[in-house]
Image: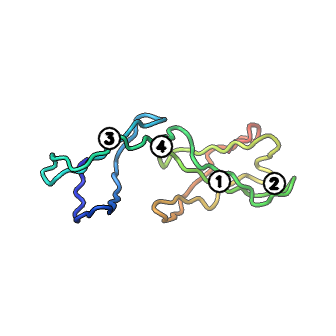
Amino acid sequence: AIVTPGALLLEGQNITFTLSQVRNLAGGQTGTFSLDTLLTDAASLVETNPTVPAVNLTIGSLADATVTPALLGSATRTTFFVQVSVSNTLQANGNVVVKFPEGFLLNDGGQTEVTGATFVVFAVETAIPATIHTSDAATREV
């Protein structure tokens, strides 16, 4: 992509921008990136860095996932706060499955329900109409 900054950049100044709609088709290490600055003809090289470090991409792995109980007491009926950052697009009709370790009971004292579901985009939190699709007490999955 060739990006025109729209402003004169002097020695030592930085430019920051975001490139959208770029899909990663491979996981793991990306390989080395390269950056060039060009004159206004978009061909004459001013500076180059052919060794911009690779990044490790998380594909098919849920990053920053947490499952946190509201109450920490043993044998206490409580609610759990679940947070997950998805690496791939999750469609509106997609599913998030929480599997509790042994020793937890679902539907204890009533049906396990989902409340307070939201998603955050650019620091804006939006409520969403999440529902429980299935609940399996034997496998401890919601």
Horizontal and vertical percent position of residue 71: 79, 60
> CA gap, disc 2 to disc 1?
20 Å
Residue beneath label 2, please?
A: 109
Whether residues under marks 3 and 4 lie with C-beta atoms below 8 angstroms apart, the answer is no
Disc nearest the viewer among 2 and 1: 1
Farthest-out residue, front: 11
Identified at 24% across, 51% down, the residue is: 37
Alpha carbons under labels 4 and 2: distance apart: 36 Å
Q: CA distance from mark 2 to mark 3?
A: 61 Å
User: Residue 100: horizontal and vertical position, in percent?
Assistant: 73, 44
Number of residues whose C-alpha sits closer than 10 Å to that of mark 2, classed few (under 14), some (14–19) or many (20 or more): few
Q: Are the residues at dot 1 and dot 3 in contact (C-beta closer than 8 Å)?
A: no
Type of amino acid at the residue the image marks with label 1: Val
Q: Amino acid at mark 4?
A: Asn
Q: Is residue 102 left or right of residue 98?
A: right
Label 4 vs 1, first from the N-terminus: 1
- Residue 95 on image: x %, y %: 56, 44
Task: Tell me what residue is drawn at x 52 percent, y 38 percent.
Answer: 60
- The residue that mark 3 highlights is 50
Residue underneath mark 1: 82
**Disc 4 designates what residue?**
88
Q: Earlier in the sequence, mark 1 or mark 3?
A: 3
Give coordinates of residue 29: x percent, y percent.
46, 36
| Mark before the other along the chain sequence, 4 or 2 | 4
Q: Element under label 4? A: loop
Q: CA distance from mark 1 to mark 3?
A: 41 Å
> Residue 18 falls in which quadrant of the image?
bottom left
